[in-house]
Image: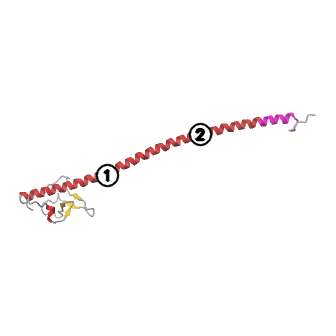
Amino acid sequence: MAYGSGKPAWGRGGDVEDGVPNRRNNANSGNSNGSYQRAGESGAYQYQSNANNNYQPPQLTGAFAEQQTQVVEDTMRTQIQAETTAGGVLAAMVGQKQQLQNANDDTWAMRTNVANAQRELKELQMKAWKKKQRLYGIIGLLSTVDLVLFFRIVQCGGSFFCRRY
């Protein structure tokens, strides 16, 4: 393609991925360490860098117009790779935000449950105390009745009904 011909590289009918031609064989750049290659079945591009993880620009050959086309194509590949990485990071951050929000909601639900449990325990303690006091009252009343009846039996000489005649 000649520079300024009005036809972009992906408009020539070649293999197109995300609007950028796919250079699987890396024929034009001459750089084996700085090429984009398709990663497995996922279809995503991954940048293959050298051991220092530094960007290696393509080795430019040919006329100035072809060199500029190669630079633009490499720039577009880098942009697509950066956007893909940014999209993955953003998706991970959205997932983490949702996890944090769920954890926060669970924490508040747990605090509410604990407060309700404390309130219910206090109510149960109060009910148990009231029952205990009522039982003490019943015990006292029955003890008084038993004592009165005991004195009556003693007073009547062993009989519950006193005969005074």
Residue type at mark 2 is: Gln
Q: In this view, does 92 lie above or below 128?
A: below
Mark 2 crowdedness (10 Å alpha carbons): few <14, some 14-19, many ≥20:
few
Q: Position of residue 9 (x, y in %)?
A: 14, 61
Which of the numbered marks, if any, corresponds to residue 49? none
Which residue is painted at 25% across and 52% down in the image?
A: 86
**Structural distance between the alpha carbons of marks 1 and 2:** 49 Å
- The amino acid type, in three-letter code, at marker 1 is Ala
Image check: 87 left or right of 23? right
Q: How crowded is mark 1: few (under 14 residues within 10 Å), some or many (20 or more)?
A: few
> Is the residue under label 2 in contact with that under label 1 (CB below 8 Å)?
no
164 sits left or right of 109 in the view: right
Q: At numbered mark 1, what does the secondary structure look like: helix, strand or loop?
A: helix
For the C terminus, the image quarter is top right
Label 2 SS: helix
Point out the image quarter for the N terminus: bottom left
Q: Report the span colored magenta.
A: 145-159
- Whichever of callouts 1 and 2 sits on the residue coming sooner in the sequence is 1
Report the residue marked by disc 2.
125
Point 81% across, 36% down: residue:
149
Residue that lies at the very extreme toward the front in this rendered image: 6
Residue 59 visible in the displayed image? no
Whole-percent x, y for residue 18 in the image: 21, 60
Identify the main secondary structure in magenta: helix
| Residue 141: quadrant of the picture | top right
Colour setup of the view: secondary structure
Classify 146 as above or below 31: above
Is residue 125 in sight in this rendering? yes
Q: Does the magenta stretch include residue 150?
A: yes
Q: Residue 114 vs residue 161: left or right?
A: left
Q: Name the residue under label 1.
A: 92
